[in-house]
Image (spheres, grey):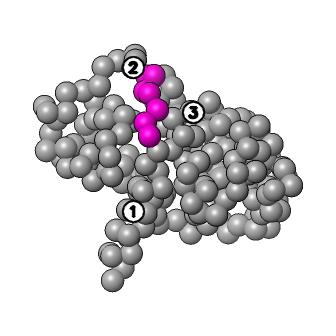
Amino acid sequence: MTRIPFPDLDKASPEVREMLARLPAPVGIFNMLAHAETALKPVMKLGGTFLGKLKLDPLLRELVILHAVNLEGGEYEWVQHVPVVLALGGTQAQVDALKAGDDQAACFSAAEKAALRLTREVVVDVGASEASLASAYEYLSEREIVELILVAGFYIMLARLTETLGIPNDPPIGDKLVSQIEARVANKKK
């Protein structure tokens, strides 16, 4: 049971209905976001950018998302993004390690460990240490580091929305959504 009711989508603006219709299935988080009508489209576009237009490696992006939302306590986004990690070639051992909070487990490469350490410090401490940033910089470009920080922050925001408002978990559509976004981006490049 949500802590505030979902908006009446039949009364939503055409723009809101059009944005929600782009999704592969109805999703509680975006339906709830429709309360903030003028924010829905920009949030969805930013999310689409993060899922389809970054230089940051897609699997690394998804590991960062899982780590950030697990640290933040965001079950909703965890449920959505575990299938994406696995579809991108991540392992169940990596998922399990992140669930346990072990971002330095042997199942992660050195680059992944550096990125996940940076993620942990950004989420938990707000700012990463010089050592963590230097370690990530060994593997990631300046652009990728900024993208990593933005992705972690975006999914923390979503976790705070879902957890505060008690949005129930939906069946995972994250892998379908990522594929849909990637196809749309590829079509625009043609």
Secondary structure at badge 3 equals: loop
Q: Position of residue 103 (x, y in %)?
A: 78, 47
Q: Which residues are magenta?
A: 165-171
Residue 120, horizontal then vertical, whole percent: 73, 43
First-in-chain label (2 vs 3): 2
Give the mark nearer the N terminus: 3 vs 1: 3
Instruction: From this view, report whether residue 38 is shown above or below residue 168.
Output: below
Residue, x 51% and y 26% (percent of image)? 163
**Which of the numbered marks, if any, corresponds to residue 181?**
1
Q: Compared with residue 142, is residue 125 higher up or lower down, i.e. above or below? A: above
Q: Is residue 61 visible?
A: no
Which residue in the structure is indicated by mark 2? 2
Cα gap from disc 2 to disc 3, whole angstroms: 15 Å
Residue that appears at 57% across and 40% down: 78
Residue appearing at x 71%, y 39% in the figure: 99
| Tag 3 residue | 74
Q: Amino acid at mark 1?
A: Ile
Which amino acid type is marked by label 2?
Answer: Thr
Q: Any mark on residue 28, and which?
A: none
Measured from the top left, where is residue 154 in percent x and y? 51, 44
Task: Tell whether label 2 touches label 1 (CB within 8 Å).
Answer: no
Check disc 3: other Cα within 10 Å, few if <14, some if 14-19, many if 20+. many
Residue sitting nearer the eye, 165 or 91:
91
